[in-house]
Amino acid sequence: MSELDALKVALKTLQDKALDEFSNAESLQALQVLRVSYLGKKGELTSVLKGVGKLPPKERPVIGQFVNASKQTLSESLEKREACLALKEKQVRIEAERIDVTLSGRTSSKGSLHPVQQGLNEMTAIFSQLGFDIAEGPEIEDEFHNFDALNIPQEHPARAMHDTFFFHPDGDEKANLLRTHTSPVQIRTMKACVDAGGEPPLAVVATGRVYRCDYDVTHSPMFHQVEVFKVDKNISLAHLKGVLQHFLSAYFEKDVPIRLRPHYFPFTEPSAEVDIACVFCHQKGCRVCKGSGWIEVLGSGMIHPNVLKSVGIDSTVYSGFAFGLGVERLVMLKYGIPDLRLFFENDVRFLRRMGA
Amino acid sequence: MKIPLSWLKEHTPIQKSVEVIADTLVRLGHEVEGIETPRSAVKGVRVGHILSMEKHPDADKLHLLSIDVGEVEPLAIVCGASNMGVGDKIPVATVGTSLPNGLKIKKGKIRGQASFGMCCSEAELGLAEDADGLLILPKDAPVGDEVGTYLALEEAVFDLDITPNRGDCMSMRGIARDLAADQGLPLIEPSDEAVQVTESVSAPNVRVLGEGDCPLYTACRIDGIKVAASPDWLQARLLAAGLRPIHGVVDVINYTMLDLGQPMHAFDADTLSGDIEVRLAKDGETFVALDGREVSLDASDLVIADAEKVIALAGIMGSDQTGVSESTTQIILESAAFKAAKISTSRRTKGLVSDSSMRFERGVDPAMIRVAMNQASQMIISLFGGKVSETTCVGDAEAVIQDKHIQVSMQRIEARLGVDVPESANDVLERMGFSIVRDDSQADTLLFSVPSHRHDVSIVEDISEEYARVIGFDAIPAVMPPLASIKPRKVQKTVESAVEQGFVQVINYAFIAADDQRLFVPDDGRDLVLANPISDAMSVMRRSVFPSLLNTAKYNMNRQQTGVALVELGRVYEGPMSQRKEINVMAWLMAGELQTDAWYEKARKADFFDMKGAVETWLTGRGLTARFMVDDDVQGFQSGQTAKIFVGKSVVGHVGKVDEAIASQYDLDTNVFVASVNLDLLHAGKQAKFQPLPEFPSIERDLVFLFDKTIASESILQAVRKACGPSLVDAHIFDLYDGQGVPDGQVSLGIRFVLQHAKRTLTQEDSDQAMQAVIEAMKTHFEAVLRG
Ligand SMILES: [Zn+2]
C-alpha cells in the first residue's frame, strides 16, 4: 500500500472513529473536548497532516483536499451534535426550573382609604370639575357663625334640634361649641370674600367633621358633611335642581331619579329636602325606604336673604343656593353599608374590604 | 304630629285614598313619617266563640267563659260584661296583647279564677266613641282571625313631621287647610255659636303687665262642674293622636289644642286667690310645675300669677298646686297669645317642654283664641255640667289677627324659582288664606295679605316658597348654572400616599377620655373640655391622635389581627379657648407583625425603622427631606427609640416606640411604634425639576470602619459628605455588624460611596483621594479605625 493510500485509510479510520465518538457525546462539554482532540491545533487530524511531508509533492494536494473534506465533515457533524445537545440541555434546564406558578405572588399587605375619605374625595372631585373652590373652616365655632349668621337666633326652635356640644365658657365669654354643620364655612367664606373687597360669583364646596350630641344606632356624635353653595346674579332653584341632579348621578355612577320636597331650614328660603329613588328596591318599596320608594339624602334651598345680609351681600342683586349632606349616609347608600357605627369602629377587616 | 283621618275629615270633606293624601301632604312640605292604622294597634285581638258561660262562684257580676279562639284548647276567661251569651262571637285580647289604652294583657287570677285573656268592647279596642258591654261580632266571623283584619278598619293615622316654622299645622285644622286648598275643597269652619253665658258667674279679673310678651289674654270661669273621665270617643281620639287621656277637663283642653291649634290651660279656681296677673317673674321666685319639678324663675320668664304665687309658666306649664283634679268644681280657663321668643327662652333655660310650648314657640294662630275658648267651654259644660262666665279679654283682639302686607314682584319670584308661575297657583294660595291683589300701577307686582296663622311668612322670599310648594318642586326644571372659572389648584395627596404604603386609614372621634389625653400630653390646663359630653370617655378634645390609634389597635388586635398598620388624618385641638388652635396632623401606628407568614417570607415584627421609613417615604413623596434627631424627652415614648422629625428648621413631629406601660394598658405587646407630623408646618415641598442625566460614569467605593456605638450614623454621614467634597453623589450605610470580632461598645459600619463628576470621568486617583480624606476625617472626628 502506498504511503498515500495508507494515509487515506488512516484518515478514514480517524474520521469514522470521530463521527462515532461525536454521536456518542452526551454533553456540550464532552463535545468540546472532542472538538479540541480532533480539530484543534494539536488535534488528531492535524497530526495526520504531519505525515504529508513524507509524500511526493505531486500527491500532497490530493491528501490536502482529502483532509479538508474530512475536516468539513467532522465540523458539520460536530455542529449538528452541538445543536442537538444544546436543545437537550435547555430542555433539561427548563424542566429543572419548573415552578408552581399558582403559588401566590410576592405582595405587600394592602392599605386602604377609609370609605368616608373615599366618599369625600369622590364628592369634592365632582364639584371641583364644576368649578367649585374648596374651603375649610374651624370645628370649634362660636354661636354667631354656627347659628346667628345662619338666621337661627337664640330662641329659634331649630336651634334646640341641633343637639349642640358646648365647651365650658372661658370667663365672661359666650360658650363656644363644636360646629353642628358645615354651614358656618358658608358664612366665613362669603364674609372673607366681602371683607377683602370682593363680590360674587362664589362657588364653594366645604367638607369636614361636624358634631351632634346624639349617640345611638343611627346617630354618631361625629360625622362628616359636605357643604356646597353658589352665589351669583340670577341663581335660581332650577340651578339648585340641576346641580343636585348632576351631583347625585355622578356620585352614584348612574342616573338616579331625584325628588325635592318642601321643607324648612332657617338659612334657606325656599328650602327642600332631597330624596333619591331607593337604590335598594328600585322604587318598588322596601324596608330601607319604608315602602315609599324614596330615600332622603340631603337638605337644600335658596340662601335666605338674612344670611346674605349677615355677610354683607346685597340680596336684591345676588341670589344663591346651598346644600349640605351627610357623607356617611351617602356612602352607606352607595355601598349598602347597614350600620353607621361601622365607620368609627375602624375594624380593619371592614376598612380593607370597603376601602380603595 | 298624629293626624287621624276621621278627625281630618271633620275639617275638610276629603275623599281621596290614604296614599294620595300622604303624597299630597309630602308635596306640601309635611313629611309623612308613617301611616298607622288601629289595625296594627290591636294586633293579638282575635275572634272568639263563646262555648260556655257560667257565673263566677265568688263574684256576682263576673262570668267564667270558655272561649274558642282557634287553638287546640279553649281559653278560660273571667269577664265582667253581661251583654253576651253562649254562641256569640266576641273580640278576645289574648295574652301578650297591648291594647290602644296601654293595657297589656297578662295571664291572671280574678277572685281566685284563672283568666287567660280579656274580652273587649269597641272602646277598649279604640274603635268606637262609647261602648256598653262587649263588641258582639257577626255570627259568621271566622274564629281565631285577627279582629282588626276582619273588620277591615280603614281609619288611618298620619304621623307627620311638622317643620318648626309651621306652628299652624300642629292641628287638624291647620293640616286640613293646606290639604283643602291644594285639593280645591272647602275648609269647614268651627262652630260660631257662642256658649251660653251665666251672668251670676263672675268673670275673672286679669291684669297684663308687659303686653309685648302677651298681646292677648282671655279667661273665663266655669262653676259647678263635676269632673269625670271623658267619653270613650274623646279618649279614643286623643289616643289616636298620641296623647294619653287624663281626666275630663284636661282631655277637652288637649282635644281643642289638637283640633284648632290653640293651647289652653285650666286652673282650679278654688286654689287661686285674688286677681290673675300676667307678668315677668321676680328673681328667686319658684314654682312647682305640674310634672312635680320645682323651678327657679328669673326676670326673663313670663308667668301667670295670682295675688300670692306663680300659677303657671306662661304657655309652658301650670303649677302642680293649681291644676284641675277630679275633685275640682270651679275652673278658670285660659286662652291667650304669648310671644314665641319668650316661650322659647323659658323653655330652654328652665328645661320644661310641653305640647303647649311646642306650639307657642312655633307660632299659634291668634284667630283661634276666641274660637277655642268657646269650643272648649261648650264641651266642658255639655260633658261635665257647670255655668260659664263672660270671658275677660285683655289686649287688642283685632290687632293680633291683623294681616301683614307684602309687595311681591312676580319677576323676582320667577327668577328665584327658575320657572314661570301659573295663574292657578294664586287660587291655591288664596284658599290657604292669603289674599292677593294686583297692583295696577306696577305690572308685575302683587300685593299679598298674609293671614294671622302664617307667622312664618314675612318677606318676598317666603312667598316664593309658598309658590314653590303650590306649584310643586317637580314642576321646576333642572338647569345647570353657568360654570364658574376653574381656579388652578394643586391636588395634594396626603393620606392617599400613606395608604399606598400599606397603611389602613382610620377615623376616630375628636374627643377622648381625659385619662387617655394624659398619657401623651401633660396636664397644663390647655385641654378643651366639653360641657355636655356623651360620656367621660368622649369629654376632652384630643391633643394627640395616639390614644385614638392605640384604641383602634387594641380593638383590632382583639379581633384576631396579628398586626396593624394604621394612619389617621385629622385635627388635634389645643386651648385655652381664647387662643385655641386646630392643628391638622397625620399620625401613624404600627404594631405586631408586618405581614403574615408566606411561603417566601416569614412574618416579621414591626420595628422603629419600619415606622421611620414610612414617614421618610411619605415626606419624600411630598418633595420634602426630613432629618431625625434623638429625643429622649417625649411623653409617652420610650427614650432611646424616639426621634424628633425635622423638616427645614422646624420640628414637625416625632417618631418612636410607645412606652411599654402605655402599650400594655391597651393590651398591646411591647412593640408599638407611632409617628405624627404636623401638616400645618410642612411647606409646599420642592417641585421636581429636570436635570440632564450624567454623561460620565460613576465610581463606587466601600469603606468599613469601627465606630464607638454612641456615635449617631447621621453625624458620621454628615462628616463623610463634608470630607468627600462635591463629587460625592451618595453615601449610605450598607452594612452594620457588632457580632464576633467587634470589640464591646463598638460597631462596624460599612459605608458605600458613589462618586461622580459632571464634566469628566473620575480617575482612580480622584476616588483614592476622596477615600483618603474620609479615612482621615473619621479618624479625627470619631477616632474610627478602618477595618480590613
Ligand atoms: Zn326601597
Image (tube, grey):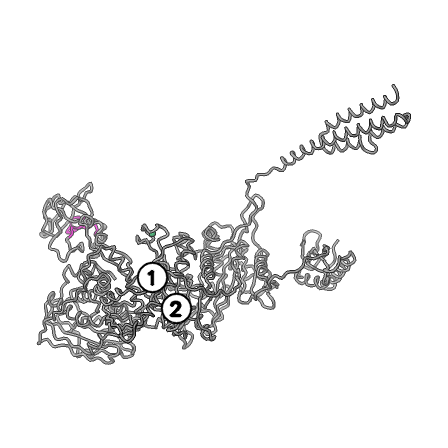
Where are the magenta residues, as a range? Answer: B104-120
Location of mark 1 (residue): B476
Label 1 crowd (10 A; few <14 / some 14-19 / many >=20) = many
**Three-letter code for the amino acid on which mark 1 is drawn:** Ile
Query: Mark 2 Cα within 10 Å, few/some/many (few <14, many 20+)?
Result: some
List x then y, in percent, for residue B366.
22, 72
Q: Which residue is mark 2?
A: A234
Same chain for mark 1 and mark 2? The answer is: no
Let me know if residue B599 appears in the view: yes
Residue nearest the observer in this picture, B487 or A264: B487
Q: Nearer the viewer, residue B461 or A26?
A: B461
Residue positioned most to the top: A1
Does dot 1 land on a helix, a strand or a loop? loop
Magenta stretch: includes residue B119: yes
Provide the chain ID for the residue under circle 1. B
Q: Position of residue B698 (x, y in %)?
A: 72, 55
Q: Is residue B162 magenta?
A: no
Quadrant containing the N terminus of chain B in the rendered view: bottom left
